[in-house]
Image (cartoon, helix red, strand yellow):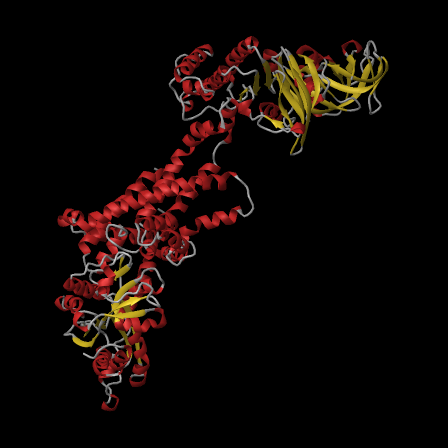
């Protein structure tokens, strides 16, 4: 090997190894610090189970809301021109870059008991969103929906209209075409977007604890349970729950690797 | 000449690493040689980890400390006592730890992280409600009413544990809407109108001024609330730490505490 | 089953202005790229709206901008076979062919049975369960044809159906198309740029150039007597325009061409085959009354023949033997003489 090629490789290798270590070492630390012998009992202890079940409920609820509301939004953003479209798109994507706790504060000012929307709701019906599971789902939807919308919009935008035209000339109505030509074509992308949105919802902390509060069984999702337990010194439960979240996140990434990481 | 950029990088990194680990030289070695005439005047920086309920009092104390120890810079970290315990155990660089209950301090004592604690203040619980007390709350029993929304501090946070202790003793079952991570965030839920009531320290209600109204809890119902303070063994500014603890028990800090409504030890 | 259309449309730089009647014959539309052939097809299919005009199918007005009528493609009884098959990737070949039937409400079993019959008919009995990506280009285009024919539309439009199929599969597919088009009981229009396809599939030829129809007539007519340079080039004829006076035609540049007989007066086309041109270094003796100076512009040799593009008062393409190229030292350029016998000229009015 010539000196120049060796030097070139070394210049790249050094920082690359550091970068890799930055990501891998904390994960290794987590695995190494886990209470492997008592992990099952930690997880099946009632508060942990409550948190697990609640996390599942809320994240799936947030996913359903993201898909139900996000699909039409993505369609309109992809296919219709209207004044201010880029601004709308930026607003929809804002929660992706907003610090979650800021999201929580924003949600409070809108939907809190004194919020401009929540206050009115409370006056009329006595219902409130903070401190309810619905509030937790709202917080998770707020942060997770943009992930779905951005993927779905890209998929709708890159739809091949030619197949749709062919279907029209064969006599298929717009609804039939959507069902049998468009949806199957975008289904893989929508699935990927859903997986991302779900993973994001599952891991949401800042907005949930700020807006929905923290109560076991109602709003204490896994990330909150981890944080509270860590604060109280119950690191066993905290790490055990962390491992569950880590496994789920890894599973999502592995499942999406072809689509998001480019190569198999 | 062959270049070895990778080795250069390693060397540079090593130098930086060594430099960082040396840290700043300990000011205590300087203070030890001070003449007697400046006895008590602490120097350098001091990191105090303190329970959230001490926020207003300790901040106020800075002026008092400034006049007696002008060369001392105190930085505070306020949070729920249990959170601070975890941080100190993980190696956070605290010099002094002030807790809102004995239980949290005992954890650190048992772990050999702090020296012998001293109780430096006492406090009382009080119910905090919004201005005007719209739900007309008169006592702890009202907090169990279905139409009243309440938050409490989470288990492990002293004020929450104190409240639960009292409620259990009185046979009152309070179902909070949320378990907050420290006393300040519980109070914020009331001052922003998100909930009707919470139980905090009397000193917190006072510090909130016009944003909150306090409803007293009878003296006989009050738990024994003692705030212990201790020097962290790994402190790098022992002289300043000792000075701070002295001030907290009998000096400028103590006076500030009393002014805020804390009871003397 | 007829289609009548009057189409006025501007799209980008193209201005389409066409009157069209599809009756009993198979019509082929040919023309250079950008002439508007695909645009024309898309407006008939309903994929592109008219600016002005009207389209009527079997007496029903399917589009009339002035009256505000416009039927969507799915509501018109128009079937299209596209250049790039456009099969649905997520469906099998059988499901693709059955698509149109199912979309119109046919029962699943019925639709599948008829689809299967169609697959047999286009010569693909064994690929029913395969997906489009498993098929070759030729096979995919056959499936596309079956898919469109299965819905039995009143009007059948084919947009360059053989262009994307590779050479080896093309002639077989051409035969299949010819067979099916002949039997089809509806209006049929094929767009193609290949004269061989046009000849094989159609009876009537429409030449579309720059949005306008420049020739509409039986195939033989168009190819024997081209009326535009593009067609002339396509069929390989020399074509010039000039003013006739008896048997003499005067070209715009002043040169004259003398034919065997004259149609009288007026502007005329003069057409002659390249192999009717003889080239000489020195003016020849003989009966050639048409003799013009020429200069070699380009030589294209194929095998033992060569086509020589010449400039001069009469620009033309001459076809000579490779031997002649060598003998005349045409590669060196220089001045030449080109001659054509009067009897070889076809002069007809514009």
Where is residue B239? Give x, y as percent: 22, 80
Residue B231 in sight in this render: no
Is residue C89 rendered to the left or right of residue C6?
A: left
- Is residue B70 shown above or below A14? below
Where is residue B77? Give x, y as percent: 28, 69
Is residue C27 rendered to the left or right of residue C257?
A: left
The C terminus of chain B lies in quadrant: bottom left
- Is residue C108 shown above or below A54? above
Where is residue B79? Give x, y as percent: 27, 66
Residue lying farthest bottom? B37
Where is residue B57? Give x, y as percent: 29, 76
Q: Nearer the viewer, residue C283 or A52?
A: A52
Residue lying farthest right? C245
- Is residue A143 shown above or below C271? below
The N terminus of chain B lies in quadrant: bottom left
Quadrant hosting residue C285: top right
Q: Nearer the viewer, residue B140 or A175?
A: B140
- Is residue C302 shown above or below A139? above
Is residue C40 rendered to the left or right of residue B196?
A: right
Q: Nearer the viewer, residue B25 or B186?
A: B186
Quadrant hosting residue A71: top left
Q: Nearer the viewer, residue C64 or C339?
A: C64
Residue A158 in sight in this render: yes
């Amino acid at each position: 090997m010539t000196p120049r090629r060796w030097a070139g490789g070394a210049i790249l290798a050094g920082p690359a190894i550091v970068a890799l270590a930055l990501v891998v070492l904390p994960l290794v630390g987590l695995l190494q610090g886990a209470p492997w012998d008592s992990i099952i009992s930690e997880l099946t202890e009632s508060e942990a189970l409550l948190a697990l079940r609640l996390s599942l409920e809320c994240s799936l609820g947030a996913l359903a809301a993201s898909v139900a509301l996000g699909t039409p939004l993505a369609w309109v953003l992809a296919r219709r021109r209207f004044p201010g479209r880029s601004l709308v798109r930026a607003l929809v994507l804002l929660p992706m870059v907003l610090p979650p706790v800021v999201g929580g504060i924003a949600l409070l000012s809108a939907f809190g008991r004194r919020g401009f929307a929540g206050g009115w709701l409370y006056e009329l019906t006595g219902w409130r969103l903070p401190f309810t599971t619905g509030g937790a789902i709202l917080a998770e939807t707020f942060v997770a929906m943009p992930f779905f919308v951005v993927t779905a919009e890209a998929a709708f935008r890159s739809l091949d209209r030619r197949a749709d035209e062919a279907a029209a000339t064969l006599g298929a109505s717009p609804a039939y075409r959507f069902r049998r030509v468009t949806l199957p074509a975008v289904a893989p992308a929508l699935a990927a977007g859903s997986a991302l949105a779900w993973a994001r919802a599952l891991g949401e902390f800042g907005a949930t604890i700020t807006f929905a509060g923290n109560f076991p069984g109602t709003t204490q999702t896994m990330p909150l349970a981890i944080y509270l337990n860590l604060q109280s010194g119950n690191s066993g439960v905290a790490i055990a729950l962390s491992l569950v979240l880590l496994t789920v996140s890894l599973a999502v990434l592995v499942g999406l690797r072809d689509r998001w990481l480019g190569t198999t | 000449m062959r270049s070895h950029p990778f080795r250069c990088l390693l060397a540079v990194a090593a130098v930086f690493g060594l430099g960082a680990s040396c840290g700043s030289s300990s000011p205590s070695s300087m203070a030890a040689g001070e003449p007697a005439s400046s006895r008590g005047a602490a120097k350098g920086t001091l990191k105090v980890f303190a329970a959230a309920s001490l926020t207003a009092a300790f901040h106020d104390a800075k002026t008092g400390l400034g006049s007696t120890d002008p060369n001392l810079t105190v930085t505070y970290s306020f949070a729920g006592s249990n959170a601070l315990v975890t941080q100190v155990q993980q190696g956070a660089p605290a010099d002094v730890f002030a807790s809102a209950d004995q239980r949290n301090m005992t954890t650190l004592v048992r772990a050999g992280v702090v020296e012998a604690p001293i109780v430096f203040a006492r406090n009382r619980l009080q119910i905090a409600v919004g201005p005007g007390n719209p739900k007309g709350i008169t006592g702890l029993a009202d907090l169990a009413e279905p139409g009243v929304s309440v938050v409490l501090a989470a288990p492990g946070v002293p004020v929450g544990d104190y409240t639960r202790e009292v409620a259990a003793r009185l046979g009152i079952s309070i179902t909070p809407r949320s378990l907050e991570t420290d006393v300040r965030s519980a109070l914020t839920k009331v001052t922003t109108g998100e909930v009707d009531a919470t139980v905090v320290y009397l000193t917190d209600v006072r510090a909130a001024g016009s944003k909150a109204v306090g409803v007293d809890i009878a003296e006989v119902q009050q738990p024994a609330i003692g705030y212990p303070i201790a020097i962290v063994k790994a402190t790098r500014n022992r002289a300043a730490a000792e000075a701070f603890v002295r001030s907290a028990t009998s000096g400028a800090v103590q006076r500030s505490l009393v002014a805020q409504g804390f009871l003397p030890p | 089953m007829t289609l009548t259309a009057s189409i006025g449309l501007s799209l980008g730089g193209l201005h389409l202005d066409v009157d069209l009647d599809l009756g009993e014959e198979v019509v082929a539309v040919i023309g250079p790229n950008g002439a508007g052939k695909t645009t024309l097809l898309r407006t008939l299919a309903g994929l592109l709206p008219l600016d002005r005009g009207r389209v009527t199918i079997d007496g029903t007005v399917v589009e009339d901008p002035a009256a505000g009528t416009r039927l969507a493609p799915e509501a018109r009884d128009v079937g299209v076979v596209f250049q790039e098959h456009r099969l649905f990737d997520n469906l099998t070949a059988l499901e693709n062919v059955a698509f149109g039937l199912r979309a119109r409400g046919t029962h699943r079993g019925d639709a599948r049975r008829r689809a299967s019959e169609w697959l047999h008919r286009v010569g693909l009995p064994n690929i029913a369960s395969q997906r489009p990506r498993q098929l070759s280009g030729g096979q995919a285009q056959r499936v596309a044809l079956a898919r469109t024919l299965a819905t039995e539309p009143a009007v059948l439009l084919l947009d360059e159906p053989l262009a994307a199929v590779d050479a080896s599969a093309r002639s077989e597919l051409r035969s299949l198309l010819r067979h099916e088009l002949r039997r089809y009981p509806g209006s049929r229009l094929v767009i193609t740029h290949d004269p061989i396809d046009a000849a094989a599939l159609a009876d009537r030829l429409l030449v579309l150039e720059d949005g306008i129809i420049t020739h509409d007539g039986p195939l033989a007519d168009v190819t024997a007597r081209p009326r535009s340079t593009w067609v002339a080039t396509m069929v390989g004829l020399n074509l010039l325009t000039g003013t006739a006076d008896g048997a003499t035609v005067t070209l715009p540049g002043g040169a004259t061409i003398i034919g065997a007989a004259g149609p009288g007066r007026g502007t005329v086309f003069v057409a002659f085959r390249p192999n009717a041109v003889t080239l000489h270094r020195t003016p020849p003796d003989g009966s050639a009354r048409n003799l013009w100076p020429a200069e070699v512009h380009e030589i294209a040799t194929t095998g033992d023949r060569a086509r020589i593009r010449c400039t001069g008062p009469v620009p033309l393409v001459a076809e000579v033997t490779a031997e002649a190229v060598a003998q005349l030292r045409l590669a060196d350029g220089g001045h030449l003489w080109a001659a054509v016998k009067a009897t070889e000229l076809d002069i007809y009015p514009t």
